[in-house]
Structure formats: structure tokens, C-alpha cells
């Protein structure tokens, strides 16, 4: 069920990115898609009752097996993706600001008409 909700969130972002004519809404759609992928990656590495693999057990208890620990690779991938998406978001916002300064609108249909 949770994976379906991630897919639904991704589809909402894709709808905003493809159908909307406002540049700010397109950027928000792309951001929503990035968050949906990040949530999906975190959910893939999650295990109910799992612990971090770097934690050592108390004295006298056996070592945890890999089946009982949470997978750290998706967490590292999501942290990297967050940093990259922050840079791409800053670039998209700066393009929106420069476009608004030049054309005075965020509507992409009006910007296309002013081209020639």
C-alpha cells in the first residue's frame, strides 16, 4: 500500500510537470517527484524491528545477522540525492527568476509567443 502511495505521489508530480503552464508549478512538480523517489528508496531499505548495522550488541548477546539490520545503502543514496536535488532546485528557481525578470511572466505559453 505504501509503495502505491509513493507511485501516486510520483504521478501527481509528473502531472504537474507535464500539464501545468506555470513555471513555478512545473518546478514544484519536479520537486514532488524527487521526494517520491526518496521516500521509495527509504522504504526499500526499511525493516520492521531492524537496527543500524553499526550498533554493537550488549555483552553476552550474539551478533546481529544481516537479516535483522536496516540496509544503510538506500539511506546513503537518499542523502546524496537530497544534496543533488537541492542544487538542481536552486538552478530551476534561478532560471524562473531570470525568466520573470526578462519577460514579466511565469506562463510558458506567453514566453514561447515572445520568441521571434
Image (cartoon, rainbow, N blue to C red):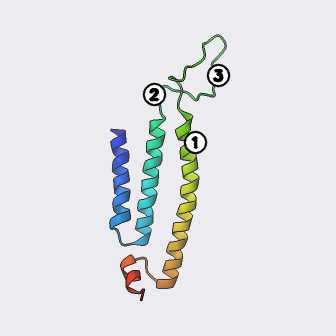
Compare marks 1 and 2 and give the one earlier in the sequence. 2
Residue at x 52% of width, y 73% of height = 95
Residue found farthest to the right: 59
Quadrant occupied by the C terminus = bottom left
Q: Which residue is mark 1?
A: 76
Residue 98 at x, y percent in the picture: 53, 78
Q: Which residue is mark 2?
A: 48
* Rendered image quadrant of residue 21: bottom left
Q: Is residue 11 left or right of residue 80?
A: left
Residue found farthest to the bottom: 116
Residue 101 at x, y percent in the picture: 52, 82
Compare marks 3 and 2 and give the one earlier in the sequence. 2
Label 3 SS: loop
Residue 27 at x, y percent in the picture: 45, 65
Work out whether 10 lies above or below 68. Answer: below
Q: In 3D space, how far apart are the residues under numbered discs 3 and 2 (Cα atoms)? A: 18 Å
Residue at x 59% of width, y 27% of height = 53
Work out whether 97 lies above or below 18. Answer: below
Q: In 3D space, how far apart are the residues under numbered discs 1 and 3 (Cα atoms)? A: 20 Å
Work out whether 91 lies above or below 113. Answer: above
Rate crowding at label 2 as few (under 14), some (14 to 19) or many (20 or more) other CA atoms within 10 Å: few
Q: Decide which of 78, 49 is in the foreground and name it.
A: 78
Compare marks 1 and 3 and give the one earlier in the sequence. 3
Residue at x 58% of width, y 53% of height = 83
Q: In 3D space, how far apart are the residues under numbered discs 1 and 2 (Cα atoms)? A: 19 Å
Tell me, yes or no, whether the two marked residues, 3 and 2, touch with CB atoms within 8 Å. Answer: no
Quadrant occupied by the N terminus = top left
Label 2 SS: loop
Q: Which residue is mark 3?
A: 56
Rate crowding at label 1 as few (under 14), some (14 to 19) or many (20 or more) other CA atoms within 10 Å: few
Residue at x 52% of width, y 68% of height = 93
* Rendered image quadrant of residue 111: bottom left
Amino acid at each position: 500500500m505504501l509503495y502505491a502511495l509513493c507511485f501516486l505521489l510520483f504521478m501527481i508530480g509528473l502531472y504537474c510537470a507535464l500539464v501545468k503552464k506555470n513555471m513555478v508549478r512545473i518546478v514544484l512538480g519536479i520537486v514532488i517527484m524527487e521526494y517520491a523517489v526518496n521516500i521509495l528508496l527509504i522504504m526499500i531499505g526499511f525493516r520492521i524491528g531492524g537496527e543500524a548495522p553499526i550498533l554493537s550488541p550488549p555483552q553476552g548477546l550474539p551478533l546481529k545477522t544481516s537479516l535483522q539490520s536496516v540496509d544503510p545503502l538506500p539511506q546513503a543514496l537518499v542523502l546524496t540525492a537530497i544534496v543533488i536535488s537541492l542544487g538542481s532546485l536552486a538552478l530551476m528557481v534561478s532560471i524562473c527568476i531570470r525568466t520573470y525578470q526578462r519577460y514579466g511572466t511565469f506562463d510558458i505559453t506567453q514566453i514561447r509567443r515572445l520568441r521571434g
